[in-house]
Each structure stands twice: as C-alpha cells, then as structure tokens.
Image: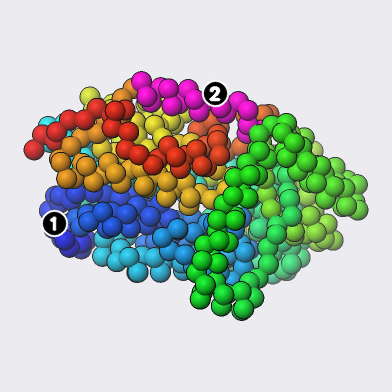
Amino acid sequence: MEGSALTSLELDSQATTVDAVVIGAGPGGIATSVALKRAGVKSFLILERESKIGGVWRDNTYPGAACDVPSFLYSFSFEMNTQWSKVFAPQAEIRDYLERCVEKYGLRRHILCDTEVVRLGFDETTSRWIVTTATGKVIKTSVVLTAVGQLNRPAVPKLSGIETFSGPHFHSARWDHHVELEGKSVAVIGAGASAIQVVPHVAKIAARLTVFQRSPPWVMPKPDRAYSDSEKWRFKWLPLLARASRAKLYWSYERGHDKVIAGTKLNKAMEVTARAIIAKIKDPALRKTVTPDYPLGCKRILLSNEWYPALAQDNVKVTAEGIERVTPTAIVTKDGGKHPVDAIIYCTGFKSTEFLLPMEIVGRDNKRLHDIWKDGAEAYRGSSVPGFPNLFMIYGPNTTVPSSAIFMIECQVNYVIKFVKRILRDELVFEVKREPMRRFNEMIQHRAQRYAWMSSCNNWFKSASGKLVNNWPSPTLKFFLLTRVLDAQNYQITRQSE
Ligand code: NAP
C-alpha cells in the first residue's frame, strides 16, 4: 500500500502491509499522524475503536464538560486556534478543533473507525508487528505507535444490588442523553474532576440530587471567562499575540509546578486558599463533609467556581457514608440511610493504570507486555519497553502532568518520530536497552517521593502496589529536553530481517 489509504473492504480481503500503524484517533493519534505525514510517511493507518475520532473529547459529552487546562495551552503548537470562546473551552469546541485538524492535515483517509485492535504480536522472523483487529483483520507493519490515552476505559463500581435498580444508570463518559433528569431524584457517585463539572448542571434541573462522596477534592477558583470579540480579532490578526498568550500560560504552569510537591511554599499557600474557600460555606455539616483530610495535590487539584455553591443548594445533599447496596428505587448507605433515586450517574473515573489493556501485546520470546507490567506499567521516556522493538507509546506511563497533556504528547511525538524516520529509511529495528530503562524508572520512582501524589490518598496516578505509573514527576521542561534528541546509544539497533 503506497501512498493511499485502505478501505475496510480492501482490509477485509487481505493481510495488509503498511509502514506504520497508529492506534487511536484522539489527540495523541492525531499529533502522531500529523508528524508521520510531515516526515513523508505515506503508508500508515490510524485504527480507531469507536466510530468517530476525538478520544476523551468525543467520549465525555456530559453537561458541563470543559477542559480544566486553558485552551491556548491545551492545543497543538502546530495548529493554533485563535478563536477559543473561553479561557477553558467546552468539550464540543475541543472535539470540533480535533475534527478540523483531521481534515486540515489530510488524516481522514488514513483512519479506519470501528476497528478495535485486540492483539499486537512481534514476528521475529520478519521484524514486523502483526496487528489483529476484533473482526480478525490482520495488518503487518514495521512500526506500531499506540495512542490510546490513559482515561479511556470507565471504572464503574460493582454496587451490590445494582441489577435490581429500576432506573437508568450510566458513567459520565458514556452519558445517556435520552435520559431526562429534569425533576428527577438523581445520584452522582464520585467527587472528582468529572463530578465537579456534572454536579452544578444536574443541580439546576433535578428535583433532588444526592452526591455520594468517598473523598472530597481540593478545589481552587477557576479563572475562566469568555474572550471578547476584540480579543479574538487581535488573536486572529496578530498571531504573535496568541503565541505569547500560550507562552505566558506555559511558563505560569511551569512556575506553579511546586503546587504538587509536598510541603513547598506554594503547596501550603494553595491549601490555605482552598481552606478559606471552604470556610465560606455557611452550613457547618457541609463544611466538614467537604474538607479533605489529605494533603493538597495528592489528587488532581480541581478548578471550579460552581462546585461548593451547587452543593449548598437546598435540593442537593452530600453524603460521605459509603454505599452499601442498591434497591430498585434507592441507594442504601452503610449508616442505614435510604436515598430514593430515579437515576444514577457514575463519576467514578477510569481504569487509568491498566495501560494498553485490553490489547494483548506479545513481544520477543513470546513475552507478554502485561506480564512484565504486573507490578505497574513503566516505559523508557514513557515510550518504549525492552523486548518490544519498534513499538512506541504516546501518552504512555509517567507522562501525565498537572498542566497540558497535549504538550507532553507533542514532546513524545517529536521523540518517537525520529525513530520512525530511521526505522523506515534504513529498515532498522530499535529496542530500548534494559539498563537505561532501569535507570530511567529508578529516577522516576525516586523523584516521585517528593510529590504530594505519593501521600495517603486514593488517586489514579499510582498502581495498586503504590508505584507512580501515570504521572511525570518533574516540570514539563525536563521532559521537553529529554525528548529533543534520538538517544540511539540507549537502544539496540539491528536490521530488519526482510
Ligand atoms: P476521578 O477524578 O478519579 O474521580 C473519581 C471519583 O469517584 C472520586 O471521587 C472517587 O473517590 C470516586 N469513586 C471511585 N470509585 C468509587 C466507588 N466505588 N464508590 C464511591 N466513589 C467512588 O475521575 P474523573 O472525575 O473521571 O476524572 C479523572 C481524570 O480525568 C481527572 O483527574 C482529569 O485528569 C481528567 N478529567 C479532566 C477534565 C477536564 O479537563 N475538564 C474533566 C474530567 C476529567 P476517591 O477519591 O475516594 O477514590
């Protein structure tokens, strides 16, 4: 296949060979594919499990969904959008932006939607990856670039008795827009980043809303506002102004990095601010319920001006009692309380630590990636793992940051694309060596100890064993610098067998 994309029909009829396969058409897959095109790679496919592109910005359609990182920073450096409606753009605007990127950079013809990859197997005789889809299609390729995200598989708690519940129940990332919540009794389970956006909206329309909170979040004011027409005009016609706005945001996030390091001045000052906001809540019982008992920064620090006012509404109740069981019409808490509900919304997060699952990934010597990762995922520079040559991850382990994921994605893309060019030009196989991988991950776990993430709270950044698997424990500038060069010395380089 040279220069043209495949149709599903062609793919059905043969075992196809392409130069590169990108898995996922979210922000990571889009950035990767734009880089492939710019590198002159023509023969590549983007395999997308769902019927549309956009990743989390396709999935999270719940009312109130918006980015919690300013849009000038949470967007591609190669595709500045000067027309964001607000500092923190709503979900539909970000999804549309991603759609526009797909069109503008000619990616559509490379994308195969409704194509779930179930297996990646490295064929040692040909040095090619064999990609198998859920419908049994087979694609052979020199390079695999996974861009499946970290927050794509909803974690739904198995509540006792839920099968008897007579009303609708769904996860925030699978919002059922057919369900009318107006005038109903609604339960929201969870009090994390999605809940704080969902709750103020549901509180406006539901007759009664009960928030089942396991642990309260630390919440800071959200400095959001609409951009005026004249600002948008200036951003459009003076592009340097938009760039400057992005740069300013970047450096302010870098300077603010200390907020997630335990015990720093900034970390303490933010906790004081967050406590002062809680202190303004009139109801002492609510005040107590929403005050966290763990250090600020251990979970993601959330931004909202609407969360506490919504919780204080007369039709809203927060319960910190654990859920015991569900009946056909109610949720029963461990204190015996019975909370009648018509609908249940799970804002309970994602299976974030299960990187790349449920794909089966089999590398050299028939080793399975998930066996190697049984104590928690790790990768060299978030990208590669010994035994899995010419397989690169975008937004892989230890690349989440408390600022822009898009920035980290672009750093990683810049890094791996250098390998891709060499692989395809010189028919090479790059496999990261064990020693640099060990040193890199030792550095990660060592640095992690300074961070509030490692203190005593549940968060989605650590594996069950307590290893930091999602977050990058340094300023993003360090990752940017690390991913500038192709460090060939840290890789075993061989020729492809064919
Ligand atoms: P989350 O922040 O991990 O919150 C999940 C919530 O559900 C937590 O309050 C958790 O309690 C609770 N929970 C989980 N299992 C439970 C159970 N069995 N019973 C009761 N409560 C339970 O998940 P999320 O809100 O989906 O957000 C995940 C990440 O997505 C965020 O950190 C952020 O990076 C991203 N996100 C971004 C945006 C944005 O940019 N606008 C919006 C939403 C999400 P515990 O805290 O006690 O575990």
Question: Taking the image as drawn, is residue 129 in sight?
Answer: yes
Label 2 secondary element: helix
Which is nearer the N-term, disc 1 or disc 2?
Answer: 1
Pick whichever, 410 or 278, lies toward us: 410
Pick whichever, 495 or 43, lies toward us: 495
Question: Taking the image as drawn, is residue 209 in sight?
Answer: no
**Is the residue 305 above or below the residue 123 in the image?**
below
Is 471 placed left or right of 22 in the picture? right
The dot on residue 446 is: 2
Is 421 placed left or right of 356 in the picture? left
| Mark 1 or 2: the one toward you | 2
**Figure quadrant of the C terminus:** top left
Q: Is residue 157 magenta?
A: no
The dot on residue 1 is: 1
Location of residue 481 by image quarter: top left
Pick whichever, 276 or 319, lies toward us: 276
Q: Which residues are magenta?
A: 435-453
Graded by Cα atoms within 10 Å as few (under 14), some (14 to 19) or many (20 or more), the crowding at tag 1 reads: few
Q: Position of residue 282 (x, y in %)?
A: 91, 53
Q: At x 20% / y 62%, what residue is drawn?
A: 5
Secondary structure character of the magenta stretch overall: helix
**Is the residue 15 above or below the residue 469 in the image?**
below
Residue type at mark 1: give it: Met
Graded by Cα atoms within 10 Å as few (under 14), some (14 to 19) or many (20 or more), the crowding at tag 2 reads: few
Q: Is mark 2 within 8 Å of ligand 1?
A: no
